[in-house]
Image (cartoon, rainbow, N blue to C red):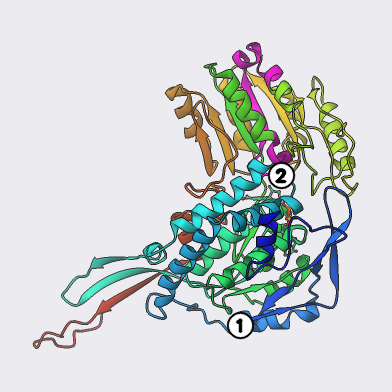
Amino acid sequence: MSVLKRCLKTAWSTVDPETLSAANPALIQNFVQGKWTSTEKTLKIVDPMNGEHFISVPDTSVQEAGPFLDAAKAVTKSGLHNPFRDVTRYKHYGAVCQKVAAQLHEPETFKFFWRLIQRVAPKSNDQSIGEMAVVRTFFENFSGDQVRFLARGFMVTGDRDGQQTQGYRWPYGPVAIIAPFNFPLEIPVLQMMGALFMGNMVTIKPDTRVAICLEQWIRFLHYCGMPLGDVSLLNGHGPTMEHLIRKDAFRMTQFTGGSRVANHLAEISKGKVKVEDAGFDWKILGPDVHDMDYVANTSDQDAYAFGGQKCSAQSIVFAHDNWVHAGFFDKIKALAEKRNLADLTAVPILTWNNTKIQQHVDAVAKIPGAKILFGGETLKEPHRIPSIYGSYRPTAVYVPIEEIYKNFNLVTSELFGPFQIVTSWSSLSQVLPLLEKMEHHLTAAVVSNDPNFLREVLGNTVNGTTYAGIRARTTGAPQNHWFGPAGDPRGAGIGTPEAIKLVWSCHREIITDTGSIPQDWKTPSSS
Ligand SMILES: NC(=O)c1ccc[n+]([C@@H]2O[C@H](COP(=O)([O-])OP(=O)(O)OC[C@H]3O[C@@H](n4cnc5c(N)ncnc54)[C@H](O)[C@@H]3O)[C@@H](O)[C@H]2O)c1
């Protein structure tokens, strides 16, 4: 109660996650050219827990896109700052980060955000607190002088006195970010801050279902000192953002979401994109069986935490026969069956309804030799999750490994929900060709402490974020290691200095040549 009251007293928030409901709905806004603005039409967002309309989000039309285009076009290619110009902004962003981190150590502010996340993308307390903990540490990491250190370049001496070459990390200027629903703050905020640190001006579009989180966050960032002209917040569905991309408003667009949209944006932007797209993330359990309970628990978390709606969620497990004989499948079944809606260890599925999920489960279960190991039906407990969303039990379907070859596209298509394929193997030659055939190379886990086994699997695969060892997982996108796909030249990363530099800056080399010309120099013959 006291926490809620104090939340409402913050200088910047306009909603209260605790009372947000059909009886106390929220209307959120766009932010452009230094002002909060509204649109003619709004989108009605329903509460995933009961189907009631509780948030209205601007449905920005193409006709209303003008101010966003003007704001982006007003920014030069050399950005809002760069190593030659407005350099105090590097320091300023260090100070903004310091203030954000300090504020997030205030329990009321921290709780405000993790509860807001939970209200629109229901996930367990651990999962939503975990998301905000990553965000907070990220801001701690870039406090003080760390933004200017992030943008550091290099120097190499030249061929003569007065000549030297310096490499700079250079901004793109106006850029765009398009974010998905599943990490309402972690994904857009870490990408946006990286873009700002490097000197870009950002136009950002969150997913409509969770847009309230970013809208409140931008109010909070203004309070913490972010200059008003640095970010435009555009709400609505894809077409208006697509219109701006087609108008060449942005020098670069960073997209996180499904592969269909990623490929489309790559075409219309003529390749000026960096993408984090779908994942079909695999885990191999090696021949050495030990720490069964730990490995089973990690597997359950990887497949079903937040209803499997993480791009890093475990989509397929290749369990060595030794694990199968030791009872691995029974262990993961027992863990999955403990999940429930009451504590949000089973949750509404925001992009797949029950009909679509059931169709996919049935299609996979029809493969010769396949069987549903557990789940395969909707949640049993009474609930009010609306039918536009999924309400499905954690599910695993066993498919014999030889049938995966024959039904490759079906088996390896991503179901963004509480669903995984499990299979068994005896020789790596059965597994490696399947990994080679896969299209997405986001996360992977090689569960073994056998160095030879690890070396063989790691040396023959490419996933960008690969965990190796008996404690390996597929999920986990903290701020302390690279997260992103490999093997795709468009691939983006998030969160670490390497990811920020790669995604949000380009290389510029300036060669100075200021020495005096020798007195005996004469114009040589042309060469
Ligand atoms: N690789 C990663 O780091 C990562 C992280 C999270 C989610 N994902 C992937 O995202 C998918 C789930 O998210 P989703 O269903 O929200 O994805 P999605 O592709 O449907 O939507 C993502 C965002 O793109 C916007 N969008 C859609 N069409 C657009 C268009 N034509 N122009 C501009 N913007 C457009 C949406 O409004 C949303 O904001 C899964 O495939 C998941 O694996 C990947």
Residue 363 lies in quadrant: top right
Q: Where residue 524 appears, x then y in whole percent?
A: 18, 84
Q: Residue furthest left?
A: 520
Q: Residues within 10 Å of mark 2 (few under 14, many from 20)?
A: many
Helix, strand or loop under label 2: loop
Q: Quadrant of ligand 1?
A: bottom right
Q: With respect to residue 505, does 83 lie above or below?
A: below
Left or right: residue 487 compared with residue 90: right
Q: Which residue is mark 2?
A: 123
Figure quadrant of the N terminus: bottom right
Residue nearest the viewer, comparing 425 with 195: 195
Q: Residue at x 65, y 61 (%)?
A: 6
Segment tinted magenta in the rendering? 304-331
In the rendered view, does 437 fall on the left or right side of 415? left
| Amino acid at pointer 2 | Lys
In terms of image quadrants, where is residue 273? bottom right
Does ligand 1 reach within 8 Å of label 2's beta carbon? no
Q: Nearer the viewer, mark 1 or mark 2?
A: 2
Q: Quadrant of the C terminus?
A: bottom left
Q: Which residue is mark 1?
A: 73
Horizontal and vertical percent for residue 450?
45, 21
**Mark 1 vs ligand 1: CB under 8 Å?**
no
Which label's residue is closer to the chain start, 1 or 2? 1
| Magenta run includes residue 312 | yes
Q: Nearer the viewer, residue 275 or 48?
A: 48
Could you tell me which residue is drawn at 62 percent across and 71 percent down?
A: 11
